[in-house]
Amino acid sequence: MASGRKDTPHRCHALCHYNLTRWKTHSVWITGRNDCGVGYGNWRAIGGRRIVSGSDDMTIRVWDADTGQPLGAPLQGHTNWVRSIAISQDGTRIVSGSHDKTIRVWDTDTGKPLGVPLQGHTHCVNSVAISPDGTRIVSGSDDMTIHVWDADTGQPLGAPLQGHTNWVRSVAISPDGTRIVSGSDDETILVWDADTGKPLGAPLQRHTGWVNSVAVSPDGTRIVSGSDDGTICVWDADTGGPLGAPLEGYTDCVYCVAISPDGTRIVSGSDDKTIRVWDADTGQLLGAPLQGHTDCLNSVVISPDGTRIVSGSSDKTIRVWDADTGKPLGAPLQGHTGRVYSIAISPDGTRIVSGSSDKTIRVWDADTGKPLGAPLQGHTKLIYSIAISPDGTRIVSGSCDNTILVWDADTGKPLGAPPRGHTKTVHSVAISPDGTRIVSGSYDKTIQVWDADTGKPLGAPLRGHTDEVYCIAISPDGTRIVSGSYDKTIRVWDADTGQPLGAPLLGHTKPVHSVAISPDGTRIVSGSYDKTIRVWNLEFLDDQLLHVPTICLSSSTTHALSSPSSFLHTSDSPVRTQEGWIVGPEGRLLLWIPIALYPATYATGNTLVIPDDALQLDLSYFAHGTSLRECQHRDAASCS
């Protein structure tokens, strides 16, 4: 999947929610074009591991992950940058999203396009994802919408998902295929019901910058997002609440995030040219940053066995790293002639699929790094996002040409007509775990769920975001979709009904660029332009999102409230807020928290936020009661 900066579309846009893998250490560099999206896969039928990259040279390349050599000729067809790449779980298809507004599906064996380009987006397709069952392709676009396409027919499934108020940078699908997660320049993440296209809950908000990337953990319990604010956030996939404080340490925007298969680690890529690995529970940085790229990180993915990390960068290269040691494995993969915006790894870990600004999608042998077949061509603009179906037979791509394309992973041929519906760039796509649906996020502010077989839209677009949708992810059970937006929020949607689940997740202070869901589906991780990463607990999804989940009151009896009506029932219970107001037991507006303090506060369910500065309120001099006049004249008394 892929996502990117609003003012500089060549920057990183991908968030991958594949599992962390561990590769044997050997020195190989894969060198190619900049701004790459990368995917890692394992095609057992062919043998070996492969990396797929997409570039601004409009091509997609497949590389041998062991040797770093290209496999076959570049996949050509896109007419603009390839922004995103996804590989079906069975490894037979590669999906690419491009700046040419289209999505293409390629046969991974032949490199031929499957069917015609998926068209519908009115702007760049930033991110694509393939449902686990390979039946649907999801795309996110600059048109602020997400589209879901039938992976077989290329027809849109339902109307575009709308809700973001800015570009959709990244989309992801939950392992069970029921949810789509999107990240946007509106600084929010939205979770959508993959079946209905309705948002599940309120937008996830904590990032203070664009959400460049979103991912869902293998168990579907967490969503991870990366943002321009330099942080990564982890969210509870059920409640939409952030888990802990944002992960900090970056000096620049966080563009892409991924979650390990066991859900214990979060991997993020930033504009500061580094990759970082975090403890998903504590938010602590694990080891030193992975350094080697000479420009911003656009996409990171983790191999299914959790041993390798694959990254795509604006330095025109794709690199493979040992997940345990952080050492580079082999030489960079080279082949794209443009920036590689998105990468995806096939479910069996043998192939890597990449989407690029060169309008092409490439499939690479994950072991040798060699390209497999010719580049997949079909998009007319850069490809923002790529997703692979669970069975590995299809690739879904989202592009700046407003379209989504579904490709036969074996032949590289497009499958059916492009799902059309988005009116702007498709920035993110994801595929449901059962492969029946594709979810896309777009700059048209919507998320669209598509039938992966017919390419037809399933229901109306998911609307709720007020700006572009950057990224999406789908929960492992497929019941929820998570999206991130330029509106700074994250939203969780019911994948079946398309209805939002709970209120938007607020907390980020800048666009949300990346979202991911944990393997167990309980947490959402978000990354934002506010340079933070946040983890949200989805248990709190049914409650109104809070900027302040816990208000710490003094234990001193001298500060006890005199009124028996109870200002707050208990000091250790989460205190609800509404548009900045602390809300009492019966919905009474008690006091308002200044917006300036929001970045340092928690939201309900936000179990991991870095920095972890919680807001503490001293009520020693808080006048309260029913008489405003009395409250104005008394210093610290009850005004009853």
Image (tube, rainbow, N blue to C red):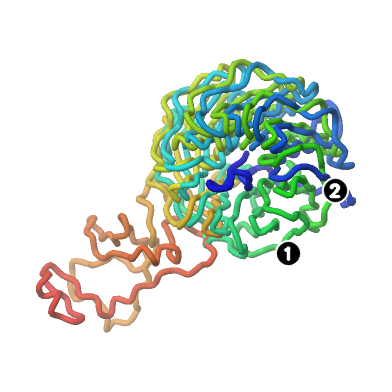
Q: 95 and 55: which one is in front?
A: 55
Image height check: is 219 above or below 125? below
- Tell me the residue that label 2 is attached to: 29
Position in image of residue 585 (x %, y %) = 25, 59
> Residue shown at 44%/62% (left/top)?
602
Q: Which mark is residue 124?
A: none
Position in image of residue 5 (x %, y %) = 56, 48
Nearer the N terminus, badge 1 or badge 2? 2
Q: Quadrant of the N terminus?
A: top right
Q: 97 and 451: which one is in front?
A: 97
> Residue shown at 67%/31% (left/top)?
359
Q: Quadrant of the C terminus?
A: bottom left
At label 1, the amino acid type is Gly
Q: Secondary structure at mark 2?
A: strand
Q: Residues within 10 Å of mark 2 (few under 14, many from 20)?
A: many
At label 2, the amino acid type is Trp
Going by the image, does 515 lie left or right of 563?
right
Image height check: is 184 above or below 131? below
Image height check: is 456 above or below 264? above
> Residue shown at 84%/39% (left/top)?
369
Classify residue 124 by image quadrant. top right
Q: Residues within 10 Å of mark 1 (few under 14, many from 20)?
A: few
- Tell me the residue that label 1 is attached to: 287
Distance between mark 1 and mark 2 Cα atoms: 21 Å
Classify residue 134 by image quadrant. top right
Q: Visible in this render: residue 473?
A: yes
Q: Secondary structure at mark 1?
A: loop
Image height check: is 361 above or below 191? above
Q: 543 and 599: which one is in front?
A: 599
